[in-house]
Image: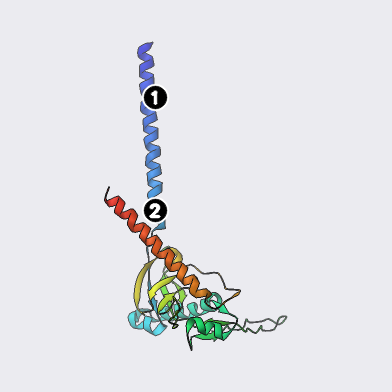
Amino acid sequence: MKRTENIQKDAFRKGWRTYRLAQVALAISAAFILAGCEQTDETVSMYQNADDCSAANPSMSAQCTTAYNNALKEAEKTAPKYASKEDCVAEFGEAQCTPVPAQAGTAAQPTQTSSSWMPLMAGYMMGRMMGGGAGFAQQPLFSSRSPASPANGQFVDASGKSYGAATSGRSVTVPKTALAPKPATTNTITRGGFGESVAKQTTMQRSSASTGSSSSSRSMGG
């Protein structure tokens, strides 16, 4: 009886250890999969206009123009909006603002006029569609010529996230969410409001990069 009991206990222990190892292996695999999903692995190119894009990609002239036009439409919806031209100019500089296009009306509701102002689109980023599709996705970019603005000389998206110098033709690696559509801007903001968003986003980016570097250093150091 004692020998049988020992055999059964050993078998149980071996089975339990195998089960536990399988669980650990699954957990590690899941962690790697999640880490892979969160990696910033989308490469995009940034251009000031469709001509710059076509010059850099002669065989993709049609795609460059389509992406540019789509970005213009997106800019109308997502660009920061200001109640007055003066507020917009103070943030983005002279000759950098335009009236928000009037909303198209219907037979029942005539065209709605708009008194809001928005910055001109300074460029656009263009990258492959998510999931490796054959098409391209785009995102409008804005830039300020006001020396006092954190967005001065930078390419920034509608949320205020900076992608570096406003130089046409640069390629950068960005999070997968960078090309995702942004929510439409329905309210006007006060003077300096967009610059404040850019400053906050920049601080967060630097903090995240610093944290990542520290973690990497600790990992390398054992």
Amino acid bearing label 1 = Phe
Left or right: residue 85 compared with residue 214: right
Taking 160 as reference, is 111 above or below it? below
Residue 121 appearing in the image = yes
Q: Position of residue 4 (x, y in %)?
A: 37, 14
Q: Identify the residue position indicated by label 2 in the image.
A: 35
Left or right: residue 136 compared with residue 55: right
Question: 42 or 106: nearer the eye?
Answer: 42
| Most distant residue in the bottom direction | 95
Q: Secondary structure at mark 1?
A: helix
Q: Identify the residue position indicated by label 1 in the image.
A: 12
Q: Secondary structure at mark 2?
A: helix
Q: Position of residue 53 (x, y in %)?
A: 37, 80
Taking 168 as reference, is 162 above or below it? above
Quadrant in the picture for residue 135: bottom left
Q: Position of residue 113 (x, y in %)?
A: 65, 84
